[in-house]
Amino acid sequence: MTYDVAIIGAGVTGASSAWHLSRYQLKTILLERWADVGFGVSKANSGIIHGGFHHPVTTLKAKLEIRGNLMFERLQHELGFPFKRTGILVVAFSDEEMSTVHKLYEQGIRNGVRDLEMCGRDRLLQLEPKLNPEVVGGFFAPGGGTIEPYRYVFSLVESARRNDVDLKCNFEVAEADRKDNAWVIRSANGEEVRARYVVNAAGLFADRVSRIFGAEEFTIHPRKGEEYLLDRNSTARPERVIFPVPTRHSKGVLVIPTAEGTTMIGPTAETVENKLDTTTSADNMKRILSHVRNMVNGISPRDLITSFAGLRPVMDNEDFYIALSEKAPDFVQAAGIQSPGLTASPAIGEYVKELLKSAGLPLLEKVHIVTELAPKHEIRHETLEEMEHLHREDPAWTHIICRCEKISEAEIVEAVRKGHTTLDGVKFYTRGGMGRCQGGFCTARIMKIISRETGIPMEELTKKGGGSRLAAGRLGDLKVETKQTCEA
Ligand SMILES: Cc1cc2nc3c(=O)[nH]c(=O)nc-3n(C[C@H](O)[C@H](O)[C@H](O)COP(=O)(O)OP(=O)(O)OC[C@H]3O[C@@H](n4cnc5c(N)ncnc54)[C@H](O)[C@@H]3O)c2cc1C
């Protein structure tokens, strides 16, 4: 068959485009090189829904950030991912920093951001008592917030699939030709997909994909950001996202109360050569700690539980590049989606849809669509009454597999049955393995459940697909008990 649209890359950009297109009478397919969706830049970021004041509205990224920000309530209502409008505080610790705060505030006003509030020291401390009392002033952007980015991507894709979008993982686009007014797209392992229109949403590799289709030549520069995660018991967790004044290349090092109850500090901003370099370093950890301890009281290195790095896909002009290709027919570029790409993503998908329409793709609305996903049970958030009810239905609901994050066997089974069959896929869907012990206790138990549910031998299970096998030898005789009742 020939699809109407093939979208290359299942991060927030591709997933949002697929979600928007799923509302129309089209056959759409999402192609992803990894074993699951959201495994690119979209899983390794600060998870902030930005406030629309960091960039001038003359840039495409600011326009889409401002529109995207306003679309999250409706999306959360329909798709149920963790998202909170915590508000953002931008804080200054000197008169010099205050002059940058004024400029940012005025930019926000010019951009049309509502409810921005300039604050003196006392008001800031009232809004966030954990701030260092030496703060001089700043402003409050109540429209900012935090989101769990992987759950957001998963739910966009789940909704798109419920509305007939196809998904092909382990499909790394390697070649493309034009035949009979359509694209013939070949994967590295010899599979073939045909589509009339193509969207390039390949993140860090959008430059390579553009070349494969004979479209525009450009270079994506990876800009690394290291993030450090604090235990959910850290007393330093603020109520709002705390921003310092920004630097030329980044929004600075932040303190982020994540949507799921932990605290994150970071990110750094460093241009690197290697698009796979996600290492973190002790020096950067010390630098980040010293920055954030100036802003918020009580941040302790003893609360650090893990670190990770993500790479921002940056174009030379620092803006998003979302446009119809002038060289390759029926080809949409959605490249250079660096920060605030997560915030802008609902609007990026809409923008991509409009570009496809302007290129001749007919958009006829479907008569029936599934708008809302069924609510997801999470035992850690249930009342005792609901827990008892779920336990009666299936004791796996109260059999806790991940003790730190309180994730039950039933939640892991649900993740696997929804197609998340790698350790990272289950981790990002359920939070199993994301707590203090970082999977020390539950990894083998989760592997056993994945193996039991899928029939994949333990030895062949992977962290994130490809060659990322979890076991070096035979594990057939490993005794891991997963069938006992409640230990919570
Ligand atoms: C450290 C850091 C912090 C950030 N913080 C924020 C924030 O707080 N708020 C915010 O709004 N933004 C933030 N961002 C930016 C945001 O994360 C990105 O803009 C966004 O995730 C980009 O999504 P994407 O879908 O374009 O790219 P990706 O998520 O990378 O998706 C591209 C996909 O294409 C796939 N792919 C690549 N090549 C091929 C191929 N040949 N064939 C098939 N598939 C292919 C990849 O595997 C990948 O899954 C941050 C970024 C970083 C790095």
Image: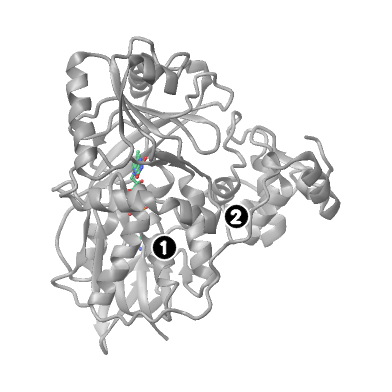
Q: Mark 2, residues whose alpha carbon is within 10 Å: few (<14), some, or many (≥20)?
A: some
Neighbours of disc 1 within 10 Å: few (<14), some (14-19), many (20+): many
Disc 1 from disc 2: Cα separation: 21 Å
- What's the residue type where badge 1 is placed? Glu
- Residue 250 quadrant: top left
Residue 187 visible within the image: no
Element under label 2?
helix
Residue 123 visible, this angle: yes
Disc assigned to residue 460? 2
Across and down, in percent, residue 52 comes to 28, 42
Please identify the quarter of the rendering in which residue 255 is found. Answer: top left
Residue furthest to the top = 134
* Residue drawn 62% across the image and 46% down it: 473
Q: Position of residue 214 (x, y in %)?
A: 18, 71
Most extreme residue toward the bottom is 180
**Residue marked by disc 1:** 32
Residue drawn at the location 42% of the way across and 39% of the way down: 145
Q: Position of residue 200 (x, y in %)?
A: 29, 64
Q: Is residue 159 above or below residue 433?
A: below
Residue type for callout 2: Glu
